[in-house]
Amino acid sequence: MKTEIDIISEIKQETSSTQCNEEEQHEEGEELRRGPWTLEEDNLLIHYVACHGEGRWNLLAKSAGLKRTGKSCRLRWLNYLKPDIKRGNLTPQEQLLILDLHSKWGNRWSKIAAHLPGRTDNEIKNYWRTRVQKQAKQLNMESNSQSFIDAIRCYYMPILVQKIEQNSTNSTTMTSSEVSAVSFMDASPTKLGDTSTSSMSLSSHFPEIPENNKSDVCVSPAYENSIDDFCSLHSCDYDMDLASTSVSDDIPFSVSHVAGDHWLGDDVSEDSLWDMDELWQFRK
DNA sequence: AATCTGAGCAACCGCAATAAG
DNA sequence: CCTTATTGCGGTTGCTCAGAT
């Protein structure tokens, strides 16, 4: 039976032979590799960490025979190879948490990632930059501006909450992350009902709604009900005031107005990564 | 079919904080 | 204390691929 050491030395041999073929030949052969990791390198790193544990990355890189910097090894391990890393799309719960925690802490990616088990700071950072900042750009807002934060709080988050509710109704069980993802809203520093900031800043960025549509200027009944149902269903302490006052009279349109009868589309529970574009599509 | 463009993501870089000698 | 090495973090880059033209 092969020991871990045997496996490592076998991989080392394979790696060195493939690297000789793949790489340019270097005078001292100590040129560090860059770019994407190969399967052999991954295996080498995995087995080395399995035998010796994490840490001492520079030493690890040398000892394992990896022609990589310690930093590179650490990054590869933490962001990709670590066993508890979650792959795949972020769930609405996770998206909700990210949005909230970012509003509290800003670009403290590692701190945010600490609250999302299995997710890395890199992944969250990428999510923010590619998905969230894209929306800010489309709205001609700074992604760190109060108006955009308000826009997220008032419109994007409630819809995510409903999506969570729909999903959990289907599954009838709620994970701890779901609980935390929803319950945070109760503790958010800027409540949705805090119109002192949101309404004023938002009104300058969104299209005006005709006066006779002002009845729409409220949170969707579907949303209101869903929050209620969600809380009773899952016995979570949710501040309904949040829902009922979330979109104030000052705000010139509502979620329900935005998308009419199809305000959440037909595929509410299908994709786990809900595209923010759905929210802003009315502007197009 | 070829080319262009943009999204998504993995990986790198620079800097700061911390640990070790 | 001072220096050096290591680690961790956030910003940025560059590659790949899919969709648009």
Image (cartoon, coloured by chain):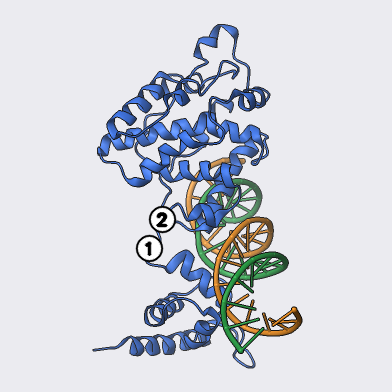
Chain colours: A blue, B green, C orange
Q: Position of residue A143 (x, y in %)?
A: 64, 41
Q: Please name the residue shown 44% across and 40% down the image.
A: A274
Q: Which mark is residue A224?
A: none
Label 2 Cα crowd, 10 Å radius (few <14 / some 14-19 / many 20+): few
**What is the CA distance from the residue labelled 1 to the residue labelled 2?**
8 Å
A238 relative to A48, above or below: above
Residue C15 at x, y percent in the picture: 58, 65
Question: Chain under label 2?
Answer: A
- The front one of A42 and A190 is A190
Evaluate whether residue A50 shows in this view.
yes
Q: Which residue is mark 1?
A: A84
User: Which residue is located at x 38 percent, y 27 percent?
Assistant: A227
Front-most of residues A191 and A132: A191
Please state, as top left, top right, bottom left or bottom right, where the N terminus of chain A lies in the image: bottom left
Discs 1, 2 touching: Cβ within 8 Å: yes
Q: As rendered, which of A172 and B12 lies closer to the eye?
A: A172
Using the rendered image of the protein, determine whether residue A69 is visible from the camera's viewpoint.
Answer: no
Q: Residues within 10 Å of mark 1 (few under 14, many from 20)?
A: few
Q: Circle 2 — which element?
A: loop
Residue most toward the top?
A: A212
Q: Looking at the picture, which amino acid does disc 2 mark? A: Pro
Chain bearing tag 1 is A
Mark 2, residue position? A117
Residue type highlighted by circle 1: Asp
Please state, as top left, top right, bottom left or bottom right, where the C terminus of chain A lies in the image. top right
Q: Residue furthest bottom?
A: A28
Image quadrant where residue B14 sits: bottom right
Left or right of A22, for residue A43: left
